[in-house]
Image (cartoon, rainbow, N blue to C red):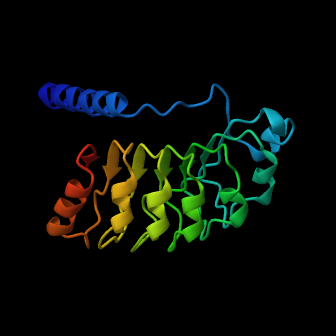
Amino acid sequence: MKKITSFIIIFLSFVINSYSQTSDIIVPEVVYESLEEALKNPEKVKGLQIRDKGLNEIPKDISKFTNLEYLRLHHNKIEKIPDFIFKMKKIRVLEIGANQLKVVPNKIGEMTQLEYLGLKANGLTNLPESVGNLINLKDLDLSFNYLESLPNSIKNLKKLKNINLLRNSTLSKEKEKEIEKLLPNCIVH
């Protein structure tokens, strides 16, 4: 039992250390976990995380955070990304994983400032061609979806360091190899 526990600890340390070396996403000092609390000083809000709240949609009040850089809305029931999000030009980290998105709007390509985009576990089958406009993207998490391929525009993401495609059972090994060729400087998981 001690050997198994030691192995697990060593393995987890390796995984965490490996990820932290490849990701250089900066998290703001203060990340609000309550929309109500954040709305008390909207101009000061740089980070907001609303997790496991059963949200069906992204609250329009988020548009009041004009300095928002870090937005995580994972583990809710969000079905679509509203247009106001695409107009928030300071957001560098956008995590909408483990929701119920079936489609990523073409307007996602307007968020050229994004450095991290997390869309894991949403049931996605494709991405729009405009994802290739996200020229500052460093990390892209598409794990646990149903992607069959990625748009060819993915090759435009020259700053991309990590792309997570784990558990996309409909993505063939052949397509994965094509993606690796399109992104030679990127770690494909």
Q: Quick one: 143 or 89, which is closer to the camera?
A: 89
Image quarter of residue 31: top right
Answer left or right for 137 relative to 13.
right
| Residue found at the far right of this picture | 40
**Vertically, is 136 above or below 59?**
above
Expressed as whole percent of the image width and height from the top left, the position of residue 108 reads: 56, 62
Q: Is residue 119 visible from the viewing direction of this image?
A: no
**Vertically, is 36 above or below 9?**
below
Answer left or right for 150 relative to 39.
left
Number of numbered discs visible in the structure rendering: 0
**Vertically, is 9 above or below 183?**
above
Q: Quick one: 15 or 53, which is closer to the camera?
A: 15
Task: Identify which residue is drawn at 62% across, 29% down.
Answer: 28
| Residue found at the far left of this picture | 3
Expressed as whole percent of the image width and height from the top left, the position of residue 37 reads: 80, 39
Task: Identify which residue is drawn at 44% across, 69% down.
Answer: 129
Answer left or right for 183 relative to 76.
left
Q: Quick one: 1 or 79, which is closer to the camera?
A: 79
Q: Quick one: 45 or 84, which is closer to the camera?
A: 84
Task: Identify which residue is drawn at 67% across, 61% down.
Answer: 55
Answer left or right for 88 relative to 41.
left
Q: Is residue 10 visible from the viewing direction of this image?
A: yes
Q: Quadrant of the N terminus?
A: top left
Expressed as whole percent of the image width and height from the top left, the position of residue 56 reads: 66, 67
